[in-house]
Amino acid sequence: MSELRIGVIGLGVISRFYLGALERVPGVRLAAVCDRDATVLEPFDGRVPGFTDHRELLAAGGLDAVVVTVPNDLHLAICRDALRAGLPVCVEKPLALRAAEGAELAALAAERRVPLFTAFHRRYNAAVRTLRATLARNPSPVRSVTARYFELIEEHVGRDRWYLDPERCGGGCVADNGPNAYDLLRLLAGPMELLGAEVVRDGDGVDRSATLELTGPDGVRGRIELDWSYPGELKDVTVELADGTVLRADLLAGHEGFKQSLWHEYEGIVGEFAGLLRGPDGPDAGAPERGPDGVDALRVVEAAYRAEAAARAGARG
């Protein structure tokens, strides 16, 4: 089969990992780029077509799928337009700002029979894959899962200051890092419901740290710890089994330097997305299953913010 032609919409801080993966993963190639800022398109001149409006990119044709990596508040409109155009979508997490928006996209993808793939990159982390393989060999059920996601957000965002705008990001650390952390819990122990949340905000109203407590099937416990003010980077997940065994995956092990683990994780995203597009022989057999996962993560994020609001109201009362 010929190479899959992929368009990348949005050339912010995360796009470099997709662009790198499109160079290294067999069977795919970059075929178009789009960003509102024409200056960031200049390095692609003479290589692939560049657009400042995603609708022009979609209308130009010649693509098999698109990657959407724009500010969170633009996910709904751009993904909706791409799905309506019949193009499969790989969208950077979170799927949308709100669970209702995510559900709209998932329903549209199902209606059009077009894959909608939410990019939870930690699924493809080497340490997480090793942990999953270990769990598959151990007959003892999972009793608890704790995911820690600590980083200094200012070191990550670069020119993408929208991360620190709750209206554009959907919140702060809960909205942005929460979906990835929750997806690890879901991956290892199944879907969960929020029990409670403690959220700490800075003077600008941005949630900079949070602790979420969750529960899942058969009483399995989940815990998410988030911190956007951590000096450096710490990302890990700890699993306790019913027999007392404790297993841990350090997501950054073997990847020296801030965000360096993302290179291999995004290769995993692009590889699985390509397999999905290729149909029956791909790992997901052509069904758009990633949208619902993205909606579930948004549901937990919204529940955390509701719990925080209720706690504040109770404190005032």
Image (cartoon, rainbow, N blue to C red):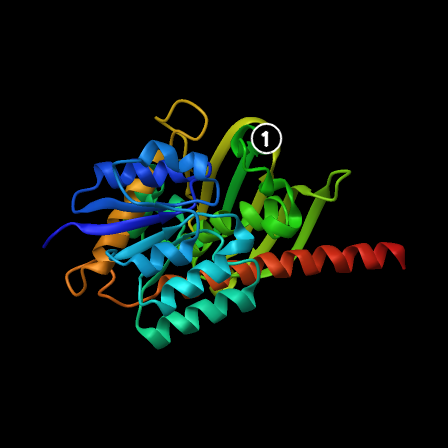
Residue 279 versus residue 235: which sits nearer the camera? 279
Left or right of 105 on screen, residue 160: right
| Residue that numbered label 1 is attached to | 154
Residue 56, image quadrant = bottom left
Q: Position of residue 240 (x, y in %)?
A: 46, 46
Residue 61 versus residue 220: which sits nearer the camera? 61
For image coordinates 59% across by 49% down, the residue present is 169
Secondary structure under tag 1 reads helix
Residue with the most extreme bottom position: 111
Q: Position of residue 251 (x, y in %)?
A: 41, 35
Left or right of 274 on screen, residue 7: right
Specify few, some or many for label 1: CA neighbours under 10 Å numbering under 14, 14-19, or 20 or more.
Answer: some
Left or right of 35 on screen, residue 206: right
Count of numbered labels shown in the rendering: 1
Q: Position of residue 31 (x, y in %)?
A: 25, 47
Residue with the most extreme right position: 317
Q: Position of residue 220 (x, y in %)?
A: 50, 58
Residue 220 versus residue 151: which sits nearer the camera? 151
